[in-house]
């Protein structure tokens, strides 16, 4: 079926296939049914579980306040889908309009939605990664396994990488009374996402809570004993730590390998799509029958210089899925753009960290409320003279205001008086982001080139 | 029966913590933790908590039907 003709037929009896049965896939399926799609709907997921919520897996699940197996997402409505769980999609044949599964089955589609998300970046050395005691944290099973290990009488835990997940794991370990060492290659925790100024606050926070935080070092090797259990970790500064558990938190990798050879513009930075979630092919031409949403999608955002943004954000997955689903079963003029303002949160060491906008674009920063020394503040990021992002530590209620400021392109530095300002001046300072040409592991927002030909990022392993 | 809180929307008003303290808890000053599952005995409290949320961030699903598992035939 072509783009604009036969939309009514598609809505009534089309075949829609969703590859990726997590948050974005589920919300898209619900939206399709809500908007009157009565055709066949197939949900394909590589995990054997129905869609579940991931944020608790690095927080309350590790603390034992929620069981990982209880995080199945609530449904907004019945979606009457055929579920094909526990089997991954293996390839896409655009000419035949079908998805081939790992078990050899093929699933034909009229419209395809790709929501395959990301997976945890594995430890770079496969043999070391296989040691008993080396963990990644992304899935329900990962979380359950790690929880069992952490409560099984462990002396010290090594967390590799102080991005959001790594910091949350370290926080949970301290709360469980475990000794924890965090090894971060950058100069401070969260530095890739929030910059060095806020990173310094996170640094203090970790040390205050008893974390043995080591910045500017990388883990060069994990050493096992003769029965394959992790015993020791070696660091780039020449030191070694005796550990039984290492949690690898080196960011995420986008699940796009299965699209190799399909002709769609998919790669390590995600799947390029337009603001309406329609996937581009490698020539930069919109496919019109293939859509992407969630962590795996990267699309241009007009508020941020039309840069292609790939956002690993819960709220983005929901919103983008709804837009994609709507557009899939609409004629051209009725389609909507995905203009969601990036937003994420983290909770660690008892502090609620929330962000709106794209901090990593910021060239200047002011603390508009509170002070950095109290760990209760709002930092506002500017970019070429306008407000581009705000980050709050225990100041969530202020963020709605800054969301409006960003959306309205308000001038930076802010000229207005703010409540709870602790300093007289609002002199902007450098937010201290690391050189963007060097890869970091902490960023949850990845900015990439305007076109596929500008994609020049190469990953340098942590031991470099 | 299950629930999820949209923590982008959540602003830490803690109405849910007062109304259903066995389901919702604050961690520190304003970070919300919640139990994603609840049972019939907690239904009333969860309902009140969801209704009282000033930013309507709590999504509740009172059904308890599991999703069908792997299906091996071609659709």
Image: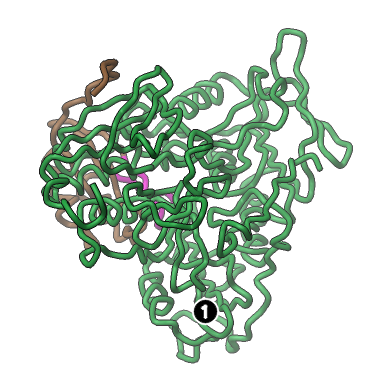
Q: Give the total of numbered labels.
A: 1
Which one is in front, A322 or A380? A322
Residue A63 is situated, as x and y percent measured from the top left of the image, at 46, 34
- Please identify the residue farthest to the right as the structure is shown: A238
Q: Would you say residue B26 sits in the magenta stretch?
A: yes
Residue A76 is situated, as x and y percent measured from the top left of the image, at 18, 44
Which residue range is magenta in the image? B24-34
Chain A image colour = green
Query: In the visual, does A3 lie left or right of A36?
Result: right
Pointer 1 local density, CA inside 10 Å: few below 14, some 14–19, many at least 20: many
Chain B image colour = brown
Query: In the visual, does A398 lie left or right of A162?
Result: left
Give the residue drawn at x 20%, y 40%. A75
Residue A156 is situated, as x and y percent measured from the top left of the image, at 67, 29
Query: In the visual, does A387 lie left or right of A294?
Result: right
Instruction: Reply above or below: A206 against B44.
Output: below
Majority secondary structure in the magenta region: strand
Q: Quadrant of residue A398?
A: bottom left
Residue under circle 1? A368
Q: Quadrant of residue A407?
A: bottom left
Instruction: Reply above or below: A289 against A226.
Output: below
Query: In the visual, does A80 lie left or right of A396?
Result: left
Give the residue drawn at x 43%, y 62%. A342
**In this rendering, does residue B26 appear at all?**
no
Q: Secondary structure at mark 1?
A: strand
Give the residue drawn at x 77%, y 42%. A218
């Amino acid at each position: 079926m072509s783009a604009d003709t036969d939309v009514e037929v598609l809505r009534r009896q089309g075949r829609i296939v969703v590859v990726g049965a997590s948050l974005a896939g589920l919300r898209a399926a619900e939206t399709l049914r809500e908007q009157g799609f009565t055709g066949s709907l197939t949900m394909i997921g590589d995990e054997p579980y129905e869609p579940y919520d991931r944020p608790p897996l690095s927080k309350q699940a590790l603390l034992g306040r929620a069981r990982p197996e209880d995080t199945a997402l609530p449904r907004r409505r019945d979606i009457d889908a055929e579920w094909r769980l526990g089997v991954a999609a293996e390839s896409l044949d655009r000419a035949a309009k079908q998805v081939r599964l790992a078990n050899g089955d093929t699933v034909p589609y009229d419209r395809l939605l790709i929501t395959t998300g990301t997976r945890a970046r594995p430890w770079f050395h496969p043999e070391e990664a296989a040691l008993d005691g080396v963990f990644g944290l992304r899935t329900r099973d990962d979380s359950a396994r790690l929880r069992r290990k952490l409560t099984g009488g462990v002396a010290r835990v090594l967390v590799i990488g102080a991005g959001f997940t790594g910091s949350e794991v370290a926080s949970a370990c301290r709360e469980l009374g475990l000794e924890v060492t965090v090894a971060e290659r950058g100069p401070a925790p969260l530095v890739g996402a929030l910059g060095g100024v806020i990173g310094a606050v996170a640094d203090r926070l970790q040390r205050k809570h008893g974390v043995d935080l080591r910045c500017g070092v990388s883990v060069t090797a994990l050493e096992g004993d003769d029965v394959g259990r992790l015993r020791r970790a070696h660091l780039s500064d020449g030191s070694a730590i005796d550990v039984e558990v290492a949690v690898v938190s080196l960011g995420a990798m986008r699940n796009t390998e299965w699209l190799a050879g399909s002709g769609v513009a998919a790669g390590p930075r995600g799947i390029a799509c337009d603001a309406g979630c329609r996937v581009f092919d490698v020539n930069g031409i919109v496919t019109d029958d293939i859509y992407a949403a969630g962590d795996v999608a990267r699309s241009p955002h007009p508020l941020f210089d039309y840069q292609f943004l790939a956002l690993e954000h819960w709220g983005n997955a929901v919103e983008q899925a709804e837009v994609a689903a709507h557009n899939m079963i609409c004629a051209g003029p009725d389609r909507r753009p995905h203009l969601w303002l990036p937003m994420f949160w983290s909770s660690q060491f008892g502090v609620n960290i929330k962000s709106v906008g794209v901090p990593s674009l910021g060239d200047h920063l002011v603390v508009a409320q509170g002070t950095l020394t109290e760990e209760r503040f709002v930092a506002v990021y500017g970019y070429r003279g306008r407000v581009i992002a705000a980050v709050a530590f225990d100041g969530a209620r202020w963020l709605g205001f800054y969301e409006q400021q960003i959306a309205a392109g308000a001038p930076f530095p802010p000229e207005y008086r703010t409540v709870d300002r602790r300093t007289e001046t609002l002199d902007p300072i450098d937010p201290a982001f690391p050189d963007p040409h060097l890869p970091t592991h902490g960023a949850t927002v990845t900015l990439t080139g305007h076109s596929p030909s500008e994609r020049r990022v190469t990953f340098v392993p942590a031991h470099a | 029966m299950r629930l999820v809180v949209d923590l982008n929307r959540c602003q830490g008003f803690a109405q849910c913590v007062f109304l259903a303290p066995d389901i919702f808890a604050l961690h520190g000053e304003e970070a919300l933790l919640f139990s994603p599952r609840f049972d019939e005995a907690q239904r009333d409290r969860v309902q009140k908590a969801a209704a009282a949320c000033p930013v309507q961030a709590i999504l509740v699903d009172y059904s308890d039907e599991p999703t069908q598992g792997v299906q091996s035939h071609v659709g």
